[in-house]
Amino acid sequence: MKTFHYIALPVTIVAACFFASPAVSDEQNALDYMPHDNFTAGWMATGDPMLASPRTIRYLLDNQLLLMEYDPLWFAGQSYSSYQGEMTIDIVQFNSASDAFGYYQMPPGDSIAPYLTDPETEFDTIRKINNTYYDGYRDRFYFKIYGEDKDWTNTLLDVAIYLYGRLPGTPTPADMVSLLPPDDLVRGTERYIRGPLGLSLVMNESDDRLARSLDSHGVEVGPSLAVGGNGDILDFKDYSYKAVAGEYRVSEGRYYLLLIAEYDDPETAGIVVDKMQEHFQNGNWRTVIVEPLRSGLHPQAFSKGKYIAFWADGSRVWLLWDLDNQRRLLEAIGQNDR
């Protein structure tokens, strides 16, 4: 059995993480930020480094379909070895900081442990996933570090902190996050969505939370619209749009998902709302009568084991998802009647 040792990286690395690095240069790519030989004692690069378009190396990447939704520009990979074992570092460079944030924030697994939080944005920027690897993001970059043995994840954490300090720029949340009303928002649940797979993951995450809550009360939960052949109700396939989502608190310790989708124009948003209404009606959801908003907009609301509401506001569509009863649905609509 191998014995693994803890890497003693300088303490100043951690402090440096909280200061902005130089801006991203268009003349540099993900490989330029890969650690060199002996970046810490005894670790040497093995094999040739890889730099390629992520679209050409699908067999190498996890979550490939999800990654493609976020418009990745470059993938860089390098393996390292020492007497302690082996590890691999992957860096993905995106076209925008919003896309890097969006990909990083997608639900990656059942066990997430944040390890580094940016003091300006209060978002975590390095985390451990399922006790198997570390990942993180900064500016337009996402990185992942994994090794051959789960027992030496402290080593991987040190390397993650070191790599984070090498990357340029700052950890910038997606621009659309600012659309989410701050009151009653559960910090850390913000999601930036660029395609149907991301939408499915976010809605399934919310459905699972509601199902666990309602199951303890013997209440049956309606099917998710994002899975099971129910289609893409927000029409990713037909229209160009992006969306932001977050969990919100309502009374008695319950939660719901707020999703705001932005389209090219108000006409498109109106068409999508009409399609959503038809989808629910054809799916035998019960219509729930609700009052108009103060702005005069009239939400459409439905129930089938859970309660939802949606409406168009200019070029944006607002969707309230996974309320557990009508009273809390009305409460959630009131929270968003700004």
Image (cartoon, rainbow, N blue to C red):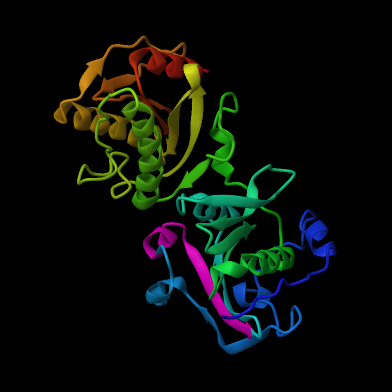
Query: Please, is residue 285 above or below residue 110 in the view?
Result: above
To which quarter of the image does residue 333 belong?
Answer: top left
One can see residue 74 in this view: yes
| Extreme residue toward the front, this view | 1
Q: Is 254 contained in the magenta span?
A: no
One can see residue 336 in this view: no
The residue depicted at 67 percent of the width and 69 percent of the height is: 155
On the image, the x and y values in percent for residue 288 come to 27, 15
Left or right for 30, reference 334: right
Query: Please, is residue 27 above or below residue 81 in the view?
Result: above
| Extreme residue toward the bottom, this view | 47
Left or right for 120, reference 300: right
- Give the quarter of the figure containing the N terminus: bottom right
The residue depicted at 49 percent of the width and 45 percent of the height is: 192
Q: Nearer the viewer, residue 133 or 1?
A: 1
On the image, the x and y values in percent for residue 185 come to 56, 29
The residue depicted at 41 percent of the width and 77 percent of the height is: 57
The residue depicted at 66 percent of the width and 85 percent of the height is: 83
On the image, the x and y values in percent for residue 302 come to 27, 22
Q: Nearer the viewer, residue 67 or 179?
A: 67
Image: magenta residue range = 64-81
To which quarter of the image does residue 90 belong?
Answer: bottom right
Query: Please, is residue 220 above or below residue 167 in the view?
Result: above
Q: Is 73 contained in the magenta span?
A: yes
Query: Please, is residue 280 above or below residue 35 in the view?
Result: above
